[in-house]
Amino acid sequence: MIRHAELEEFSWSVRRQELWNRCRRSYFLHYYAARGGHDQFADSELRRIHEMRSLLSEKSYLRRLIAMELRNKFYLPHEEENPEFPEHVPRLSFAVMSRFNREFRRMLTGEFQRDHATPMLNTLYDNFTSASEIKARLDRQLSQMLDALESGVWAMLFRSRFLHRRPIDSPLKVAIGHLACFVAPIIAFQERGILSIVANGKTDSTALLLRYYAMNQLHIAPQNVHTLELIPEEGILKESGIELNIGHTLREIRNGAADMLNAIRPSGDVAIDDFPPNLNSCSDCNFRFFCN
Ligand code: SF4
């Protein structure tokens, strides 16, 4: 299998680096082999690779669901309310649970087969566990997370004055020199000169990219930026990048990107044989049916 690499601009992300480190074959399948598979009229093998690429683990689905609804509520328009102080803390659980029930129904009706942009769980796709078992498990986990959030950090976040909330794109493109990078913040707010950015990740690379964004786009010095990881399972925010070594992390990102770009042949092609499988990583890989 051979694809042409330069059809899309190369960009670096934590997710891309993780796949690269974990199994080169899965990296190839995810970033190159699946291209074009979103098209309903693509051939069946390409459609299937793209389907596998789009599957979500239960943990990442739940985290994504909560992050999306938390972001929606945090940035809701507030024209009819006091512009400075929220009057009450809205429940997060209603919005999250209704979205979950809606999306789970769609998963069961196979909407994902028609539109790969709709979420689908890898456990449902595998068909090894009954749908009702999966639903019950996710219901339980979601309720625990929502209890933890509503009695924890959600109330604190929502009490921040509307005037202090800062819109931020997600995903967010951050340029390091000529290298385009992507990171996915959830929300941002700024009080007493300190910009706090909440994200799902806790890596130093995430902290670095968010500081780069703040410095280059908002002109806020890195020491005035706090990056926080949302841990919905515990209902808390945890500061990330506390021991960030900017030079070291920058080198890691640049070297990682250089390794990935070096895997492209001089002709601009990428070939599956240049990306060896790592059989130690197969147990929870989305592509295991393809590889087998
Ligand atoms: S199934 Fe294993 S070898 Fe194949 S892509 Fe996944 S991790 Fe790599």
Image: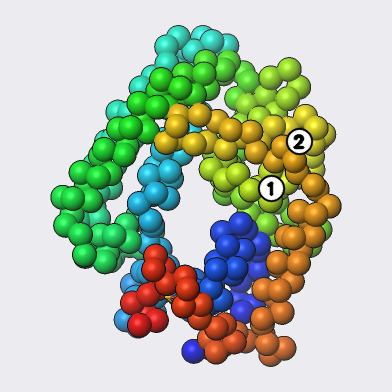
Residue at (69%, 47%) from the top-left corner? Answer: 204
Q: Residues within 10 Å of mark 1 (few under 14, many from 20)?
A: many
**Given the image, on which type of amino acid does mark 1 rest?**
Asp
Quadrant assignment, res 186: top right
Q: Position of residue 201 (x, y in %)?
A: 57, 45
Determine whether 130 is above or below 222 in the image. Answer: below
Q: Position of residue 237 (x, y in %)?
A: 55, 30
Taking the image as shown, residue 292 lies to the left or right of residue 132, namely right
Please give the residue where the numbered disc 2 appears in the rendered image: 218
Q: Position of residue 22 (x, y in %)?
A: 55, 68
Taking the image as shown, residue 198 lies to the left or right of residue 220, namely left
- Rendered image: mark on residue 189: none
Taking the image as shown, residue 236 lies to the left or right of residue 192, namely left
Q: Position of residue 203 (x, y in %)?
A: 63, 48
Distance from the alpha carbon under mark 1 to that under mark 2:
20 Å
- Badge 2 marks a residue whose secondary structure is helix
- Of 75 and 27, nearer the camera is 27
Q: Residue furthest front?
A: 280
- Of 13 and 134, nearer the camera is 134
Taking the image as shown, residue 223 lies to the left or right of residue 129, namely right
Residue 217: in sight, yes or no?
A: no
Circles 1 and 2 in contact, beta carbons < 8 Å: no
Q: Residues within 10 Å of mark 2 (few under 14, many from 20)?
A: few
Q: Earlier in the sequence, mark 1 or mark 2?
A: 1
Q: Quadrant of the C terminus?
A: bottom left
Residue at (25%, 60%) from the top-left corner? Answer: 124
Determine whether 277 is above or below 86 in the image. Answer: below
**Quadrant containing ligand 1:** bottom left
Determine whether 253 is above or below 171 in the image. Answer: below
- Badge 1 marks a residue whose secondary structure is helix
Please give the residue where the numbered disc 1 appears in the rendered image: 204
Residue at (49%, 36%) from the top-left corner? Answer: 231
